[in-house]
Amino acid sequence: MPNKDTYKRKHKYLDKQISHLERTNYYNRTLIANLKKRKLKLKDKLISHTRELARREKYNSHEYIKRVLSMTA
């Protein structure tokens, strides 16, 4: 799974690219729209990745607590 910083870096790159195209290449709306769609998909992946990490961490902490409690019983 890609790193969270990789998603952020790609997102920032797309944002800069979109801004530049909007200033200099305003007549090519299709290209700009496609880049914006890619940027949104990337943001969705970042959010999904973050949620998945949080879910795994929560699961792992519950498993750890179960093991500790079973050892004391």
Image: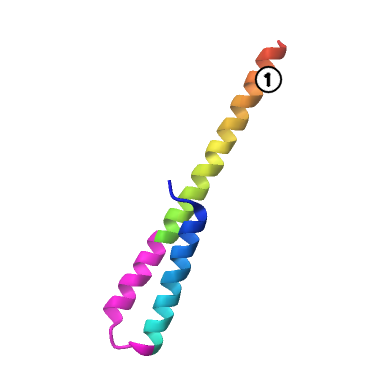
**Vertical position of residue 36 compared to residue 66: above or below:** below
**Residue 61 percent coordinates (x, y):** 62, 31
- Verify whether residue 36 appears in magenta: yes
* Residue matched to label 1: 68
Image position, residue 12 (x, y; %): 48, 69
- Give the x, y percent position of residue 42: 41, 60
| Left or right: 55 in relation to 18 | right
Picture quarter with the C terminus: top right
Residue drawn at point x = 41 percent, y = 70 percent: 14
Please report the residue visible at 40 percent of the width from the left and 76 percent of the height from the top: 17
**Which residue occupies 43% across, 80% down?**
19
Amino acid type, mark 1: Val
- In terms of secondary structure, where does tag 1 sit? helix
SS majority, magenta: helix
58 relative to 18, above or below: above
58 magenta-colored: no
Tell me which segment is drawn in magenta.
24-41
Report the coloring of the rendering: rainbow
Residue 15 spot, x, y in % from top left: 44, 73
Drawn side of residue 49 relative to residue 30, left or right = right
Extreme residue toward the right, this view = 72
